[in-house]
Image (cartoon, rainbow, N blue to C red):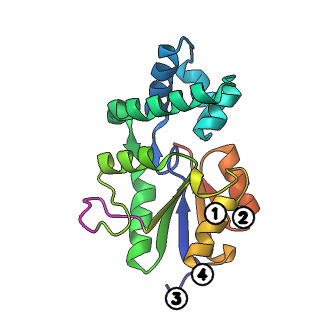
Amino acid sequence: MPDSPIRLILLDFDGTLADTRHANARAYMQALAEEGFILTEEEYCARYFGMRCDDFLRSYGIGDPVLRERLRLRKIALYPTFFDSVTLNRPLWEFCRQFRTQGGRVWIVSTGSRANIEGVMRHLGLGMPGDVSAPEGQVDGILTGPDVARSKPHPDCFLETMRREGVRPGETLIFEDSAIGLEAARRSGAAWFRVTL
């Protein structure tokens, strides 16, 4: 890509590449309701969307790690039942597809679980790394919360992806939507762009 210093695009997933707010909220609402907790979609979207599951559940007030793990697994199991409410950020995805045809690399960098991300990607027709048969195209890599010790707002996830690609912050463009994601992007030293769905 001789006309551009940008060699790598890093995409947050939930709320940036895909609007998963309703699906995430509804899966959490049902999982929590089964344990006797009440969460509204409005509360989840306003206060917790974009947080790593364990961080969200602790912030919500669930101190028992066994219960948090049970809720996490139940939410993962419920999540696909709400995929019909998920939509792709088509303008951003088309931009990334064009970027890849010019030799650029595109990664998803998210605090979400890999199982959740891959499930939504399959639903939307997006391919994992190496999946050239995906109808909507593919990404070059996926890095999720468990792949680094510190989650956003720390920049570790972005810096680790740059390290894996051999790219400097000045050669990277990050797309994010949440306050914690934008803070992580800022701390990484890369250029960033706020997405509002």
Disc 1 to disc 2: CB gap under 8 Å: yes
Q: Tell me the mark number nearer the camera, choosing from 1 and 4.
A: 1
Relative vertical location of residue 139 with respect to residue 28 in this rendering, above or below: below
Residue at 29% over, 53% down: 125
Above or below residue 127? Residue 78 is: above
Residue topped by disc 3: 2
| Residue pointed to by mark 2 | 188
Pointer 2 or 3: first along the chain? 3
Q: Which residues are magenta?
A: 132-139
Q: Earlier in the sequence, mark 1 or mark 4?
A: 4
Distance from label 1 to label 3 (Cα)?
A: 23 Å
Real-space CA distance between mark 1 and mark 4, rounded to the nearest whole angstrom? 17 Å
Q: Which amino acid type corresponds to the residue marked 3 in the rendered image?
A: Pro
Residue at image coords 69%, 60%: 156
Distance (Cα) linking label 2 and label 3 = 24 Å
- Report the residue marked by disc 1: 158
Name which of mark 1 and mark 2 comes first in the sequence: 1
Between disc 1 and disc 3, the foreground one is 1
Residue type at numbered disc 4: Pro
Secondary element at tag 1: helix
Checking the image for residue 5, the label placed there is 4
Residue 58, quarter of picture: top right
SS type, badge 4 = loop
Q: Could you say which disc has been placed on residue 191 in the image?
A: none
